[in-house]
Amino acid sequence: MLRDLYGRVVTNLRITVTQRCNLNCIYCHREGEKDFEKEMDAERIAEIANAFYRLGVKKLKITGGEPLLREDICDIIAMMPDFDEISLTTNGMLLSDKAEELEESGLDRVNISLDTLNYEKFKYVTGGGNLDSVIEGLISAINAKLTPVKLNMVLMKGINDEEIFEMLKFANSFNKESTRVILQLIELIPNSNTKDLYISPEFFEKQLSTISRAIKIRDMHRRKQFLTPLGIVEIVKPLDNSDFCRHCNRIRITSDGKIKLCLMSDEKVDISNLHGEKLKDTILKVIKLRRPFFT
């Protein structure tokens, strides 16, 4: 079991497999990575994943950049140990052609970035993306049973803040027989391009509370899930949120093989050339360096 000095048990591993992307979203922070040339090979990714698995980590999320740009992405998934869940984040542009193969390789579900259903706003936010391709990818993921799909909607003032309930209805339109799509509202982490677009999720929490038949609290980050007549909504609030930090059970690996101690910090420890017991011992030591960013 991986437990830090604040009593937080690490059960979730997030591995960035590439920083390459076929879109250029205005809010993307790339988790502080700047060197897009260095990518671990599939064997190295599997070795690190296995080390964390043997130390008690239960769930794996594969992310990027855009993971589906890697030609060996299905090989990477097939090489993973027997995690309770393996999920993948994607912008959905390439998903329609790969959903079935991803499922056959052992992928359990996907998160798809979808900030707006407005074609012009979608192009602006993504730097020229094709909304139809993303929707096709979503449908393919549902058909391949990569569910529940989570639609990641980053909240942005003046862009999608009046579209929440439209997006919720869209997500719920796929839930006739079972919950196959969940809307996930994500607090914007502002950068120089988006500082004027920030809007607090608290306003939407209050709105959702008034129509919810139940509110669940997840172990991870104490995230709230609102069970509404229109569908399920989960809210992710990382900024200035001590509850988020106090209940963080996730550790992150960068695409060039460094442990990133915290979403909000650039502090990293290089494990790219470590193997066997040295890799295990370093992971154990690094976990003790984790500390809440907001207290």
Image: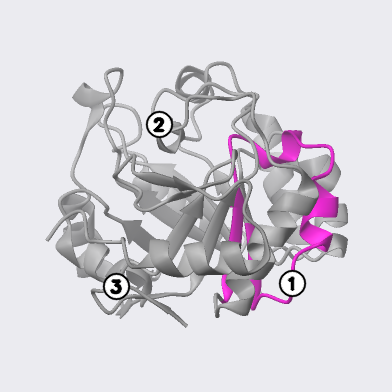
- Apparent side of residue 102 relative to residue 133 in the rendered image (left or right): right
Give the residue type that dot 1 points to.
Pro
Q: Is disc 2 placed on a helix, strand or loop?
A: loop
Q: In which quarter of the image is residue 285?
A: bottom left
Mark before the other along the chain sequence, 3 or 2: 2
Q: Element at badge 1?
A: loop
Q: Which of marks 1 and 2 is nearer the N terminus?
A: 2
Measure the alpha-carbon separation of dots 1 and 3: 38 Å
Image position of 102 (left or right of 231): right
Q: Taking the image as drawn, is residue 272 in sight?
A: yes
Query: Which label was assigned to residue 212?
Result: 3
**Residue 117, position as x, y percentages in the image:** 51, 35
* Residue 274 higher or lower than 159, as above or below: below
Q: Mark 1 points at which residue?
A: 81
Q: Mark 3: which amino acid?
A: Ser
Position of residue 270 measured from the top left corner of the image (x, y, whole percent): 50, 45
At horizontal 57% and vertical 77% (from top left) the residue drawn is 58
Q: What residue type is labelled 2?
A: His
Is the residue 187 above or below the residue 39 in the image?
Answer: below
Q: Nearer the viewer, residue 218 or 229?
A: 218
* Quadrant that contains the C terminus: bottom left
Task: State which mark lies toward you, 1 or 3.
Answer: 1
